[in-house]
Amino acid sequence: MALVLTQDETMLVDSARGLLEREAPVTAFRALRDSGEPLAWDRSLYGKLAENGLVAPIVAEGDDGVGMGIAAAGLVLEQSGHVLAAAPLLSAAISATLIAGAAGDSQHVDLLGPIVAGERVVAPALDEAARHDPSLIETRAERSGDGWSLSGAKTAVIDGHKADGYIISAMADGAPALFLVEKGASGLTVEKFTTVDSRNYAKLTLSGTPAVRLGEGDASAGIAAGLDVGRALLAAELLGVADEAFDRTVSYLKERRQFDRVIGSFQALQHRAARMYARLDIVRGVVLKALRALDEGHADATWLASLAKGTMTRLARDVMMEAMQMHGGIGMTDDFDVGLFVKRAQSAGELLGDDHFQTERLAAG
């Protein structure tokens, strides 16, 4: 398993970085947040990402995708973390994984093609509890004529407030199953809530809501696969967020003067920065290994996905704490960009299981 980027992956990173730095700098995210835009992400940016094959590169070529795999999706998410890009990349990748694993062949292109093209946002709705617990599925599916109807509730639905459709887990015939529900469906109520990082999520309430079942039989394995991909991709995004916060902190240490000296000349701060650099470099390998393992169907892929997410969540939290302290008082203010990275690290760290959840999962084997 190579822990270096291929030539194609390097080109992908360069393409993603160039587009995101040009079209979605951190100032753009701040402006979007301050504008009160209810969507909370940039449709124009999302369209440009799709045009360049950067939305769900995980999707196979036969399903209208570019077929570069999970590692490629992770590299794109990492670059998005550097600029705090407001685009539904994570939800697209998770939903695409769920569809590819559960839907019948005849459903693939119809469902995946519009996602890859950036024409539809399909949000995964898998959580029901305040704390991530994928084993808790109380939403029920019942046969209704030739189709199905769903009753229950979902929470923390990523990009769910303005999604065009939802991939929803529910119990059907005594086993977990996946269903597609379209926006505006009867009996569907969508309640938006905003997290500390200014991203919008949704709580869904379903009451006899019509749905289309994706595939047949027990979907437990497909749901688990989608969550593993989501955890690894979140780890990649957190790596980008932490990397950028570190780079900005080092730049500040080289500029800020105190006691007639650049504060970066103080050995105590140099040692703290060096520890951050070393830890980031080590965990970078863990994240890439998890992404590669998922691509290759490695036996330890699930374990590695949790390891990457848990380790990166802790590291991002530590890097953010150091970044705030080394910036001094201004690091706590909203006017300074480092605070935006702190908030994203906090929120992303909680998604799909925080570091405590991942540690418990690893300990359970």
Image (tube, grey):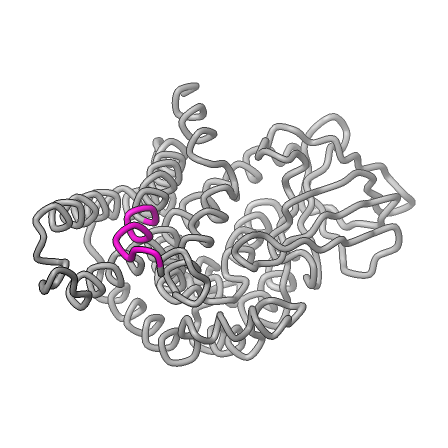
Q: How far from the left and from the top, in percent, is residue 143?
A: 86, 39
In the picture as drawn, the residue positioned furthest to the top comes out as 364
Q: Nearer the viewer, residue 145 or 6?
A: 6
Range of magenta residues: 320-329
- Foreground pick, 58 / 263: 263
Residue 164: percent from the left, percent from the top? 70, 63
Give percent across and percent down for residue 48: 48, 78
Is most of the magenta stretch helix, strand or loop? Answer: helix
What is the total number of numbered labels drawn onto the structure image? 0
Let me know if residue 198 appears in the view: yes
Q: Please state the horizontal and vertical placement of residue 225, each as a whole percent of the image.
A: 50, 40
The residue drawn where x is 34% and y is 56% is 329
Q: Nearer the viewer, residue 282 or 111?
A: 282
Would residue 326 be counted in the magenta stretch?
yes
In this picture, residue 185 sits left or right of residue 15: right
The quadrant of the rendering that contains the C terminus is: top left
Please determine whether, in this image, residue 159 is positioned above or below residue 150: below
Vertical order, 142 against 333 (above or below): above
